[in-house]
Image: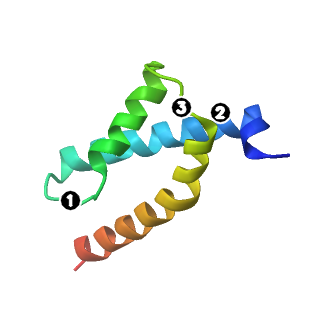
Amino acid sequence: MKFNTNFMAIRTAERNLELVGEAIRQLLIIDPEARITHAKDIIGLRNMLAHAYDSIDSTALWKILIKDIPELKAEIHKHIRHSNE
């Protein structure tokens, strides 16, 4: 089954991206010096998903999952390593 026709997969992705956006928001409150490249966009996406301001296209969602999340993961790991030094 394709992602863009799988309602449960889309809703699961949306919910997880909400959680990621909230986590980034909280991180910036705790550590305003944290450098997350697209923090404002991530938090903005979280707000759109949480408050249903706009419908998120499943193709855009898939791009975020495939391209942007791995990049964010690498940034978070880098931040954790620097925080532990």
| C-alpha distance separating marks 3 and 2 | 11 Å
Q: Position of residue 80 (x, y in %)?
A: 32, 69
Q: Say which mark, if any, is on residue 13.
A: none
What residue is at 80 percent from the left and 46 percent from the top?
2
Mark found first going from the N terminus, 2 or 1? 2
Which is in the foreground here, disc 2 or disc 1?
Answer: 2
Q: Secondary structure at mark 1?
A: loop
Residues at marks 3 and 2 touching, judged by CB atoms closer than 8 Å: no
Q: Secondary structure at mark 3?
A: loop
| C-alpha distance separating marks 2 and 1 | 29 Å
| C-alpha distance separating marks 3 and 1 | 27 Å
Query: Looking at the image, is 25 positioned above or below residue 75?
Result: above
Query: In the shown orientation, is residue 48 left or right of residue 26?
Result: right
Query: In the shown orientation, is residue 66 left or right of residue 21?
Result: right
Q: Quadrant of residue 61?
A: top right
Mark found first going from the N terminus, 3 or 2? 2
**Label 2 CA crowd tier, 10 Å (few <14, some 14–19, many 20+):** few
Q: Position of residue 47 (x, y in %)?
A: 38, 29
Q: Say which mark, if any, is on residue 11.
A: 2
Q: Amino acid at mark 1?
A: Ala
Q: What residue sits right under mark 1 in the picture?
A: 34
Query: In the shown orientation, is residue 48 left or right of residue 14?
Result: left
Q: What residue sits right under mark 3 in the picture?
A: 56
